[in-house]
Image (cartoon, rainbow, N blue to C red):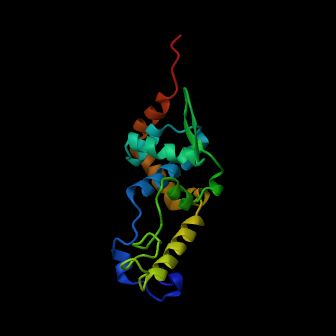
Amino acid sequence: MTKLLGYDTLPTILLGSDIMRLTTKGRYAVTSILDLALHQEKGPTPLAGISARQDISLSYLEQLFAQLRRRGLVQSVRGPGGGYHLGRDPAAISVAEVIEAVNETTDATRCKGSGDCQKGETCLTHHLWMDLSDQIRAFLGDISLADLVTRQEILSISDQQQTRAPESTASLDAAAIPVNNV
């Protein structure tokens, strides 16, 4: 990261400040769609299963997935055995696209890119922060869900989450499938 933007070091203010912060909304969107990608081979994934594995409230997931669905990143399947699946191939969904789908930004400027940072005019470091914003967007745009689901550390964490609460996620997933008592 020290060679980012061609600068030898990044200012400490960038690493420890509030200039650019990915909010919980953006983090949860990426986490939940990654969970969906990891479990897609099992068929539609109920949000209750993602909620249990990722410790994200179900009502919050419903809001996030409504936004992801509007952008075509996920599709819903209604009825027994229903849930969500990816709207496109995982290789065609970037982390940046997920973040933007929930109206988050990777902008590192205080002026939100408008250039009116200092009393209505462009500040000295505006272009530095704009360049950083572009680099962050490009970096996250180059990472697809397909890239993430093949990473060993992600697979290992996913396995741990599954074994930590197998009965809760299994019962939530099974709850979507009705049992016919004939």
> What residue appears at the point 58 percent right and 65 percent down from the top-left corner?
141
Which percent across, then down, holds residue 130?
49, 76
Q: Quadrant of residue 122?
A: bottom left
81 vs 41: above or below: above
Left or right: 78 in relation to 19: right
Q: How many numbered discs, if any?
A: 0
Q: Is residue 134 visible?
A: yes
Quick one: which residue is furthest to the front in this view? 120
> What residue appears at the point 62 percent right and 53 percent down from the top-left corner?
90
Which percent across, then down, holds residue 105?
47, 63
Which percent across, then down, holds residue 139?
55, 70
- Closest to the observer: 31 or 159? 31
Which percent across, then down, holds residue 42?
58, 39
Quick one: which residue is furthest to the bottom in this view? 8
Quick one: which residue is furthest to the top in this view? 182
Q: Quadrant of residue 143?
A: bottom right
> What residue appears at the point 52 percent right and 54 percent down from the top-left corner?
101
Left or right: 162 in relation to 140: left
Left or right: 103 in relation to 145: left
Q: Is residue 163 visible?
A: no
175 vs 10: above or below: above
